């Protein structure tokens, strides 16, 4: 007896092979071009494209340009319901050709996104792609002077630069930067100093007379929406975060620098709540930062859990805590 399910599967497989071999459209080289075929599905895709496309790109900074060799790009456009696909390779070639002559900036993103919307559109109807998105991740190196000694090292900041452009001409540009710092617990510092005083006064004989407050490496990730019509560099954001939280981790220290760092930490004890409010004040004072959101985490040396917070500007329909969970 013939297995009908086998025949059905075999027939379906033959139909797939037939469809693949009988493409009605060919490119300039005579190769089948399925991307331009019409579709019967009529299902729109809000965002389709490429993740993790790697290339070196120059980054425009306050002093010229810096080349970053570890960039990863994510680039997308929307797909209308009546379209079968997009030209993925064209996303790459547009990004490469623009990066060959321009450093990363708001204008760089404007140029790339506009080219996506124009050059990935169908030649027949000449209708622009409705929306385009580009996100570029890299580690940004900055020379960091040692606190006291005549030395310096490289501080690396994980960075995301991203932008969107929509059919109504709306363009939005965002910077995300990760900043590491040291946080000394105010409560622990107070109790350590209280113990040292009581030991010196003979009220206790426990321990050695030296109390050490707990401090920890801490990290914040700051996302800002920048006015694209002004020049705002990564260094500008780094300086704002240093102003809010001066206890940035150090890249190279001698003993004199280590002592200076201990003094710096003692001068700026903070809970995660203190750090959050300090960053809020600094970012709110900048008119060119249209919106912002900051995630903070103090990676505790006392507890096996971490203290964390999320704070944001509160713009209507803007960045919110519930957009990151």
Image (tube, rainbow, N blue to C red):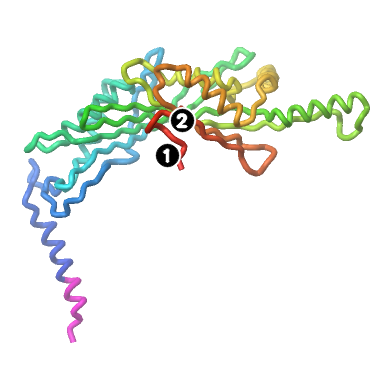
Left or right: where 232 falls relative to 217 = left
Locate residue 20, reporting x and y percent. 13, 57
- 6 falls in the magenta region: yes
User: Where is 181 relative to 15, above or below?
Assistant: above
Quadrant that contains the N terminus: bottom left
Left or right: where 313 falls relative to 114 = right
CB atoms of marks 1 and 2 within 8 Å: yes
Residue 251 in view, yes or no = no
Locate residue 7, reporting x and y percent. 17, 75
Question: Which residue is rendered at x = 14% and y = 49% of the image?
Answer: 34
Q: Of callouts 1 and 2, which one flags the residue occurring earlier in the amino acid sequence? A: 2
Determine whether the residue tagged by mark 2 lies in a helix, strand or loop.
strand
The stretch in magenta equals 1-10
Locate residue 78, reporting x and y percent. 23, 40
Question: On the image, numbered disc 2 is attached to which residue?
Answer: 293
Give the numbered dot on residue 281: none
Left or right: where 213 falls relative to 251 = right
**Principal secondary structure, stretch drawn in magenta:** helix
Question: On the image, numbered disc 1 is attached to which residue?
Answer: 323
Dot 1, crowdedness within 10 Å: few (<14), some or many (≥20)?
Answer: few
């Amino acid at each position: 007896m013939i297995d009908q399910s086998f025949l059905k599967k075999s027939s379906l497989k033959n139909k797939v092979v037939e469809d693949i071999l009988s493409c009605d459209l060919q490119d300039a080289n005579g190769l089948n071009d399925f991307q331009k075929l019409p579709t019967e599905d009529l299902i729109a895709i809000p965002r389709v494209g490429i993740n993790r496309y790697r290339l070196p790109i120059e980054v425009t900074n306050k002093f010229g340009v810096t080349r970053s060799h570890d960039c990863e790009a994510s680039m997308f456009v929307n797909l209308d319901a009546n379209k079968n696909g997009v030209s993925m390779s064209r996303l790459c070639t547009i990004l490469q050709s623009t990066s060959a002559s321009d450093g990363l900036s708001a204008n760089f993103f404007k140029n790339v996104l506009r080219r996506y919307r124009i050059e990935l559109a169908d030649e027949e109807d000449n209708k622009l792609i409705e929306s385009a998105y580009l996100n570029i991740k890299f580690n940004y190196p900055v020379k960091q002077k040692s606190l006291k000694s005549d030395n310096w090292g490289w501080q690396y900041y994980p960075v995301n630069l991203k932008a969107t452009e929509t059919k109504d001409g709306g363009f939005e540009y965002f910077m995300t930067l990760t900043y590491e710092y040291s946080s000394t617990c105010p409560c622990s510092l107070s109790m350590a100093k209280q113990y040292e005083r009581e030991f010196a006064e003979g009220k206790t004989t426990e321990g050695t007379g030296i109390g050490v407050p707990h401090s920890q490496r801490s990290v914040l990730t700051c996302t800002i929406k920048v006015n694209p019509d002004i020049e705002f560099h990564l260094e500008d954001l780094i300086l704002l975060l240093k102003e809010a939280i001066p206890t940035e981790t150090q890249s190279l220290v001698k003993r004199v620098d280590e002592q200076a760092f201990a003094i710096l930490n003692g001068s700026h004890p903070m809970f995660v709540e203190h750090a959050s409010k300090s960053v809020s004040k600094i970012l709110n004072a900048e008119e060119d930062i249209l919106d912002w959101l900051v995630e903070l985490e103090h990676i505790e040396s006392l507890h096996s859990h971490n203290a964390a917070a999320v704070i944001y500007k509160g713009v209507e329909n803007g960045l919110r805590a519930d957009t990151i969970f």
